[in-house]
Amino acid sequence: MLLTLTTTHRPATDLGHLLVKHPERVQSFGLPAGTAHVLYPEADEQRCTAALLVEVDPFKLGGGRGRRQAATPDSFTLGQYVNDRPYAASSLLSSALAKVFRSALRGESRDRPELAATPIPLEVRVPVLRCRGGAELAVRLFAPLGWAVTATPIPLDEAYPEWGDSRYVDLTLTGALRVADALNHLYVLLPVLDDAKHYWVAPDEVDKLLRAGAGWLADHPERSLITRRYLAHSRALAGEALARLAELRLADEAPVDDTVDPVGPAEEPDRKRASLALRRREAVLAALRDQGASRVLDLGCGGGALLAALVADRRFTEIVGTDVSSQALTLAARRLRLDRLPERQRDRIKLWQSALTYRDDRLRGYDAAVLMEVIEHLDPPRLPALEDAVFGHVRPGTVVVTTPNVEYNVRYEGLGTGRFRHADHRFEWTRAEFAAWVDRVAVAHGYAATLGGVGDDDPEVGSPTQLAVFTRTEEAARKEEIRA
Ligand code: SAH
């Protein structure tokens, strides 16, 4: 079975550094069920292709050594030894990937750390892939991850087209992705498409899946099919994995705040929700840039969607995410791939567990703080504590706050009257309520504030999201200097 990975990034031979396999060498690795070879059919400045070729030993595969590796359902029959396993890409190819490209899967590259963190033009080809669910499923699994997918069914026998197609497809993926992401997608999705029965499961299989799926599986529209198939041998494990993914989604970013869709077909909500979340992030980033902030706090950072956007902009030299939930921080670390970032990038980012209702000295001295979709998660009697901690104690030059505009909720069809957008919201304010709060806090703590909205501005009910930018006044700043 064969998989090739091609790049046209210049110099293309850098692929060798990313995969940690020298383009001029053929290397072989022993596997439980055969041998994997890595070689480069082409390697020049313009174009470089690495090929992973796995030779399967049918005897080992059949359990010759007493191991139960991917045996066919008809154990102890000839089927163990005579089957398509040696030729069609499958979970065996996936385990070969894991073994042969271990550090590349983690996004590590000693020689080209920056490149490892950068999307580059890639083409993946798997000429024979067993694909239960057909070519169409391959598209459904890879396309949402940013791949252009060509999956061509292979006829059962070219001489007899009337026999129809086989279960195999010829798969080509093209896109601009990080090599690590590409490898992780393949590592998880090849066995999912194959959907062969595995009988041997390591106990840490769920962890492995979540690790390889970090940053893309929780939000994948087919996450449930992927998880079930990946862990097909065990309902309990699939259940556990799905529950953990759901938790990640729940703890993840505020898009869950806009779970209700104003209009439209079933697939609409996700898109709408995502687009409002995106516009909100853009609005917050614009406010931070406007204020010339470079050292910023994202308070109640959740799953780190804003952090990721901050990291992508070099003007933000120090970025701190805080949250009261350690799970949210774990998720943020995964989304940012903290453990895979080059040191220089990693040093820009800190993630701290911290409650907004307590004064935290670590947060003092930054240019700006963001409270994006956070205040409405606090019980109203706890708000004054947040005001004191953020505006009274941390006192950054700028504070950007966003929160839902409850008036807009009537535009969300299906959101019962009086219901909030998210189960964990303790309140949602009208524009007048938010304005009054902003005004009171600004006056009390020596800030000036401007109000705005994010999302479509409805003539009657305003925008779905309200936004306020607080800037510490000169006078307040002077007084503080004198006091200091
Ligand atoms: N700002 C993120 C997440 C919003 S969800 C975004 O817009 O995507 C609200 C977040 O606030 C959750 O992650 C929750 O854990 C956090 N949170 C709630 N109460 C908090 C408190 N008292 N202190 C710190 N974080 C809190």
Image (spheres, rainbow, N blue to C red):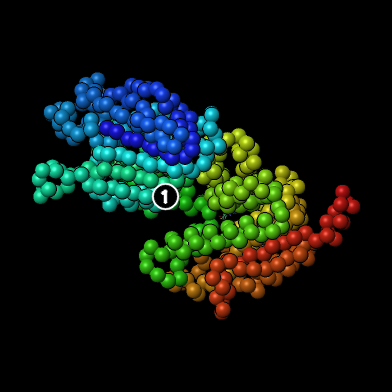
Tell me the residue at 58%/57% (across/down): 281
Q: Where residue 194 sits: x, y (%)?
A: 27, 41
Tell me the residue at 71%/54% (across/down): 292
Question: Which residue position is annotated with label 1?
Answer: 146
Question: What's the residue type where badge 1 is placed?
Answer: Gly
Tell me the quarter of the image containing the N terminus: top left
Q: From the viewer's perspective, is residue 283 above or below residue 217?
A: below
Residue 354 seen from this side? no
Q: From the viewer's perspective, is residue 430 above or below residue 224?
A: below
Tell me the residue at 38%/42% (across/down): 123
- Looking at the rendered structure, the number of numbered marks drawn on it comes to 1
Q: Nearer the viewer, residue 266 or 407?
A: 266
Q: Where residue 246 sits: x, y (%)?
A: 43, 50
Q: Where residue 327 sits: x, y (%)?
A: 53, 45
Q: As drawn, is 138 to the left or to the right of 147?
A: left
Quarter location, residue 387: bottom right
Residue 481 seen from this side? yes
Q: Residue furthest bottom?
A: 460
Q: Where residue 467 sits: x, y (%)?
A: 63, 65
